[in-house]
Amino acid sequence: MTEPKKGLSKTKIGAAILVVILAIGVLLFSGVLQRPGVTTMTPTTTIVPSVNQTLVVDFTSSPSSVDPVSTYEIAGWGVIQNVMQSLVYYNNSDSSHIVPVLAESYTVSPDGKDLTFILRKGITFSTGDAFNAYCVWYTFYRAAVMGGAGSYSYTVDLDMSGVTAEELNQVNSTTNMPPDSLLPVITNSSHAISVPNSYEVHFHFNNPFPDIWGWMVAAPIMDPAAIGMHGGVVANQPNSWANLNPVGTGPFVLQTWVQGSYMVLAANPNYWGGPGGGVSPKPSLSKVEIRFVPSETTREQHILSGAAQLAIIDTARISSVNGSAGVVLPDIGISNTYYFIPIDVQQYPLNITLVREAVVHAINLDQINQIVYHGLLYPTAGVVPYGMLGFNDSMKPYAYDPTLASSLLEQAGFPNGKGMPTLSFYYGTDYPESYSVGQIVQANLAAVGIKVDLKGLAFGEVLSLDYSTSPQSRDHPSLQWVSLTNPPVPSAYADAVFTTGNSVNLGGYSDPMVDKLCLEADGTLNSTLRAQLYWETSNIVYNSYSYIFEGNMKDFFPAQFFVFRTNVHGYYYQSAFSGLDFSTIYLS
């Protein structure tokens, strides 16, 4: 994947809690609201887990990469987070508490600007290479130097200057210890990250940052020795070996991967075992066989027959599968997964506000909800999704009004669409519903005289096209389907999608006031003030007609409907975990 667009200054903010955080976890000022209907999936009756069992899973398509720095795809992250681990993680489904994982404990300075981790000892990667503080330093700076699509989780609000690829490539022995000549760089306390010894890491922020934990949970630590043996770090370039070979400290290892066919994750025989609270425990499953099955009919047959215990089912088939004997769609309530259509605000004539206003009112979003999503889409709008600080349910998606749309087009100088160039709508071929959305958008806009070509690519390839072409170019998507599942903190949506040049700002939207408000919200500890700032931001974006807001999906695990056989237990919903945590799942 090509280098993503650059975000706001990486020096803008830092850690946000003004008290010492104990290792058992603490209630955070993350601004996540309690969502009705969201519960852990642990059964109330006592069920004895089976041992040495294989979980068979039907997914739609194979990941393009399993390097957390190079990919932004849910498919890749669903594998990454079962193989690799971060310093901390949410207490499973409870996004109000953080618990240490690779860290043993952590503290925050009184001014909220310095975050210190004390690491667990005796942990090794699946390769047998040692895990230590230098691996943490290497991982974060590797992301900054590579600049890949997933680097944002590592670099957000840190000044990552001052370290080169050449220096990173010196931390590559099996002990993962740097040479003495590199210690002045690694121990330099003026850098964003410094390592005073093998089991202590300091993060240095310029300002408090209430959402830092939401990003920390999505920053898996990598094995410098393994990467060093296979191409090392090259500035602004992906590592082709790391794209296909995830190495981590987690409960599973990648045993087999037949591209486009299947993948097998095996329980890590050398796994150190997760901390208390059930986070990343030693798995009950011996293997997870992930099959890549593009056929909707075949996936449905597999889950109904029991040939698969877990399958991704398309929205059109949910009603027929859910409730069938031995099959269940978990009731998790309204998810964090946010659907919207970015409009390329720099591409003529979408750079004209009246034209964009016409487009948003020409599209029948209720039709999309009923026909494509079968009423499972909860209509929302704004810069943060449902359930997060700053969300306001009074803001709804734009009303469908083709008469108004036609009038606006005429005012803009395009009566009945005359003189309008053909627009492009890009959909993800690995997300079948996105094509159906595109068909409705195409028909709705044709009704007011706007022609739209539908163009399909794998979702990751659409993102690559976004990053590699200028928004002013006709080659850049005019409109596109986007499903976004990020950690459950408001900046993961407001900053990433709406601030100038950030990673998911795909339509080239830019407003200095939006940038200013988000920057202020990021460094504000007062939750009431933060909510007000996000609400002001939402109003500016909403009145710019730069995004077609659809809403949040109900009963939706990250990016897909996961349907389970009733003998599958122990799963939970957490949007920071981009898929399923196989370490907590067991079969009865």
Image: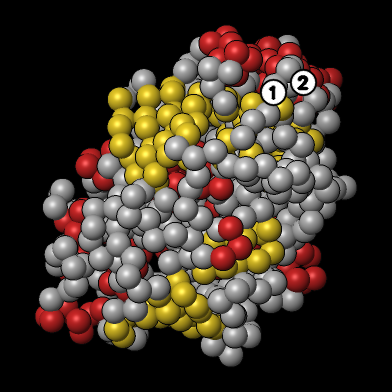
Please name the residue shown 80% across and 25% down the image: 375
Q: Residue furthest right?
A: 394
**Front position in the image: 270 or 328:** 270
Please state the horizontal and vertical placement of residue 170, each as a whole percent of the image: 14, 67
Please name the residue shown 19% across and 72% down the image: 177
Answer above or below: position of 101 versus 195: above
Say what amino acid the circle numbered 1 marks.
Val
**Front position in the image: 258 or 146:** 258
Residue for badge 2: 323
Residue for badge 1: 327
Say what amino acid the circle numbered 2 marks.
Gly
Answer above or below: position of 540 versus 213: above
- Which image quarter holds the N terminus? top left
Label 1: element kind:
strand
310 on left or right of 367: left
**Front position in the image: 416 or 100:** 100
Please state the horizontal and vertical placement of residue 117, each as a whole percent of the image: 44, 78
Asked whether the residues under the numbered discs 1 and 2 touch, taking CB atoms below 8 Å apart as contact, a structural biologist would say yes
Q: Residues within 10 Å of mark 1 (few under 14, many from 20)?
A: many
Please state the horizontal and vertical placement of residue 279, each as a whole percent of the image: 55, 58
Answer above or below: position of 436 versus 557: above
336 on left or right of 103: right
**Front position in the image: 215 or 131:** 131
Give the CA distance from mark 1 to mark 2: 6 Å
Answer above or below: position of 585 versus 145: above
> In the rendered image, is residue 82 in sight?
yes
Q: Residue furthest bottom?
A: 110
Please name the residue shown 51% across and 65% down the image: 275
